[in-house]
Each structure stands twice: as structure tokens, then as C-alpha cells.
Amino acid sequence: MTRYCQLTLIDRNGDAHSWQVPAGANLRQALLGQGFSPYTRYTQTLNCGGRGLCATCGVWITKGEPPARHWHDKAAQRFGYPRLSCQIRVEQDMQVEMVDKWVWGSRKKH
Ligand code: FES
């Protein structure tokens, strides 16, 4: 029996969107599958395809933040930067916010 988690996205306009994903779903794929891209116009095609190399798929996780497993995502979590959506599995209910990425280097939230 498949277990599902509630994934909520707060988009760049502040609007909330919620849907169910199978437990263990890849966050990047779950977002893209609903038409929500963590990328900018430029990195939409110039990214590593979810291999944890380019750091362009970052999102803020505001509820249900999981521990990091990937070295790059561990650094992001440790230093307070957006988490790499391609390296996160949705194992519990989670709320995610998109990152304003128009100024490089200003991604730190806190
Ligand atoms: S898509 Fe490249 S690090 Fe996530």
C-alpha cells in the first residue's frame, strides 16, 4: 500500500499549492511534475539534471525539513542556504518556498 505525503509549495507570488506525492518522491521531480520549476529562465535548460552538481535547484523548506544526505546539500543546510531539491526525498508532509534567484549571492534567507 502506497503511503502519500502532502507537499505544499508557496510560489513566488505567495500563493500556496498543495498536492499528494508518494512517500520517497524526489522533490525536484515532484515540483516539475506539477509545473513548478525551481530554476530560473536560464538554468531551466542549463542544469545538471538532478545530479547534485549545479546548485541551481535550491528551494527553502519551511516545514518538514529532512536531514541532508548529499554532501552539497549538507553544506547548504549547514550554512543556511537553499536546499537542493534534486537531493531531497519527500518522506513526510513538507512545505517548500521558491527562492528569488535574480541576484546571485543574495540567496541566503537568514
Ligand atoms: S539540479 Fe543540479 S544540483 Fe540539483
Image: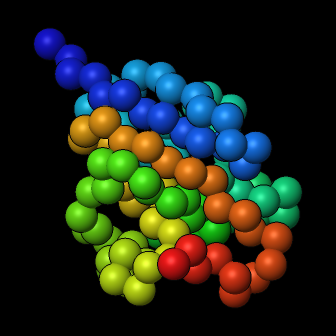
Horizontal side of residue 89 vs 85, given as left or right = left
Q: Residue at x 26, y 32 (%)?
A: 23
* Residue positioned most to the left: 1
Residue 79 x/y as whole percent? 41, 86
Residue 62 x/y as whole percent? 43, 54
Residue 22: image quadrant is top left
Residue 7: image quadrant is top left
Residue 17: image quadrant is top right
Residue 104 x/y as whole percent? 75, 82
What colour scheme has been applied to the protein in the rendered image?
A: rainbow
Horizontal side of residue 89 vs 110, given as left or right = left
Q: Is residue 30 above or below residue 109?
A: above
- All told, the count of numbered labels is 0
Q: Residue at x 30, y 48 (%)?
A: 64
Q: Is residue 29 above or below residue 84?
A: above
Quarter of the figure that contains the N terminus: top left
Q: Is residue 94 above or below residue 102?
A: above
Q: Residue at x 48, y 35 (%)?
A: 8
Horizontal side of residue 26 vs 64, given as left or right = right
Q: Is residue 48 visible?
A: no
Q: Residue at x 21, y 17 (%)?
A: 2
* Residue positioned most to the top: 1
Q: Is residue 6 visible?
A: yes
Residue 77 x/y as whole percent? 37, 75
